[in-house]
Image (cartoon, rainbow, N blue to C red):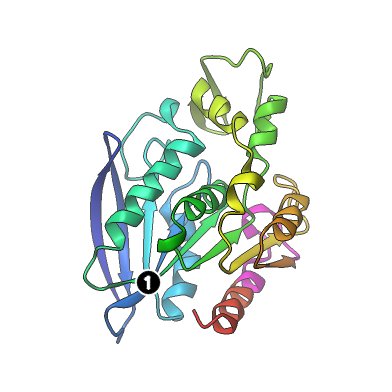
Amino acid sequence: MSIKLFSIYSHSNTLRGIIIKPKDAVYPCKTAIVSHGFASNLTITSPYAKTLVKAGYVTVLFDFCMSGSGLSSGNSTGMSVLTEKENLNDLLYYVKRLPYVDEKNIVLAGCSQGGLVSALSAAENIEDVKALLLYYPALCIPDDARRGHMITAKFAPDHVPETFHAITVKLGRKYAEDAASLDPYKEIVAFEKPVLIVHGIEDTLVNIDYSRRAQREYKNCTLVEVHGDHGFIKKGFRASRKATLKFLKEHNL
């Protein structure tokens, strides 16, 4: 296994991350891009990377721009789900042109907010994405914005403050307004290739009903419900790893 640092420009910011190549891989190689969640960074996605590298994938981990933590640049008050979607679109464009990447065999994976972002990006890049792996995807974010309760932040939906804090991240009005403008189910269903969703039934941050609806809306989706919380912090990751490897095998990915 080898690890390479990279950086690219994405909408006036610098996006940074790492590329992990599996040992004894044959190139060009199938590739996975893994997106982290809100108030997070690429270190949180490393357990998923280990699973994908074990399955033979060149695996790309990165920090979203303006995320409030991590290696990439930008002020968090300018970040939103839509700016992160543009980051991921830019990264996909970069990755598929790498000489050791099989451009016809790229999988997007995402955790929480990164799951929503990955789903939106896949729907815009159908020809470039072979499958989706979504872990506890935060499809609730648009509803949360419309009711004025986003994680730890509360505000009047028709009077969003110029800035506000959610967990440790200082956000701008753009974050709430962009989220409120989204109808995620209407947008993501354009992606008709294989989708895996793994969600914990004890998740109190993103209700599993959001993933159950996504399973109904997608044309080709497997939903695996596991005993676990949001982020699989206490439990759930082992079951998610098993579900991932089974899904990849069944779909010859």
246 inside magenta stretch:
no
Total marks shown come to 1
Dot 1: within a 10 Å radius of its alpha carbon, few (fewer than 14), some, or many (20 or more) residues?
A: some
Residue designated by label 1: 104
**Is residue 5 positioned above or below 67 on the image?**
below
Position of 75 with respect to 221 (left or right) is left
In this view of the protein, can residue 172 be seen by the observer?
Answer: no
**Image point 61% across, 81% down: which residue?**
246
Q: Position of residue 241 (x, y in %)?
A: 59, 73
Q: Position of residue 68 (x, y in %)?
A: 43, 35
**Disc 1 marks which amino acid?**
Lys
Q: Position of residue 53 (x, y in %)?
A: 41, 75
- Magenta span: 226-240
**Image point 33% across, 33% down: which residue?**
74
**Is residue 157 positioned above or below 1 on the image?**
above
Position of 67 with respect to 116 (left or right) is left
For the residue pair 143 and 105, the one nearer the viewer reads as: 105
Residue 243, quarter of picture: bottom right
**Image point 56% across, 67% down: which residue?**
193
Position of 59 with respect to 118 (left or right) is left
Q: Quadrant of the N terminus?
A: bottom left
Position of 125 with respect to 4 (left or right) is right
In this view of the protein, can residue 54 be seen by the observer?
Answer: yes
SS for callout 1: strand
Q: Position of residue 95 (x, y in %)?
A: 30, 61
Residue 86, quarter of picture: top left
**Is residue 29 positioned above or below 231 on the image?**
below
239 inside magenta stretch:
yes
